[in-house]
Amino acid sequence: MIQHTTLDMELTDGMNRAERCVKRCFDIVVALSSLLVLSPFMLLIAIALKLKAHGPVLFRQERIGYRAHPFKILKFRTMRTDTERDGRPLLAQTDDERLIPLGRFLRTHHLDELPQLWNILVGEMSFVGPRPERRYFIDQIMAENSDYRYIFCMRPGATSKATIYNGYTDTMEKMLVRLQMDLDYYQHRSLLMDAQILWTTLKYVLFGKNF
């Protein structure tokens, strides 16, 4: 069980207080602007999902975020509604058979992530940071490496170095690799590094490179 407690940190945050403030201001301005500009496009995606697939348009799932507080992550639904009928959490695969046809397209082009602009706007997430995980998998990761506790010192992100270079974390081995990359980010992060990660992510999305 994850405790909502103040951590006795041994690792040092690469960003100082002023940089974290600038990062948060950037998140608010860009998330709000993006929601306003992209809202017609997002509405079209929602209508297409409603017409092509049964069930809700949005996928909501509890994740553990900043300071170990739970929140509901938002995505456009890409899978069938009966994907975890037995109640046991399952890891998503790169080419998951549970994907609906339109969902496969949305996921390939990372359009399913657009609703997370709201998570960013309200402060549950940031544009750049470790991807938020479910409590079930966090408990397994912490059994292997308790340094995961440092992840709670950052807002989870829509993208990260681990997202770009480690791909879908569909195995525990990949989860542990992702953790090491996220811990390295925590210790060395900067506004310049965030800009580089965002630029790389944008290039990959625009030119259709899988990650």
Image: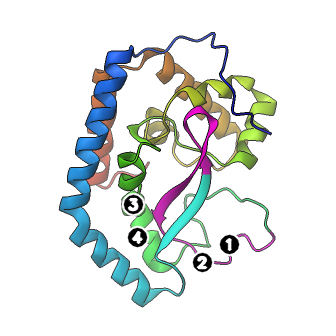
- Residue type at numbered disc 2: Arg
150 or 78: nearer the viewer: 150
- Residue type at numbered disc 1: Thr
Read off the residue under disc 1.
83
Q: For label 1, count other residues whose C-alpha is less than 10 Å away and answer few (under 14), some (14-19) or many (20+).
A: some
Q: Which mark is residue 158?
A: none
Q: What SS does tag 3 mark?
A: loop
Sequence-wise first label, 4 or 2: 2
Q: Which residues are magenta?
A: 63-86
Read off the residue under disc 3.
115
Sequence-wise first label, 4 or 3: 4
Question: Is residue 51 visible in the rendered structure shown here?
Answer: yes
Read off the residue under disc 2.
80
Q: Is residue 93 above or below residue 159?
A: below
State the CA–CA distance, disc 3 to disc 1: 21 Å
- Reply yes or no: does residue 30 show up in magenta: no
Res 3 quadrant in image: top right
153 or 187: nearer the viewer: 153
- Reply yes or no: does residue 84 show up in magenta: yes
Mark 4 against mark 1, which lies toward the viewer? 1
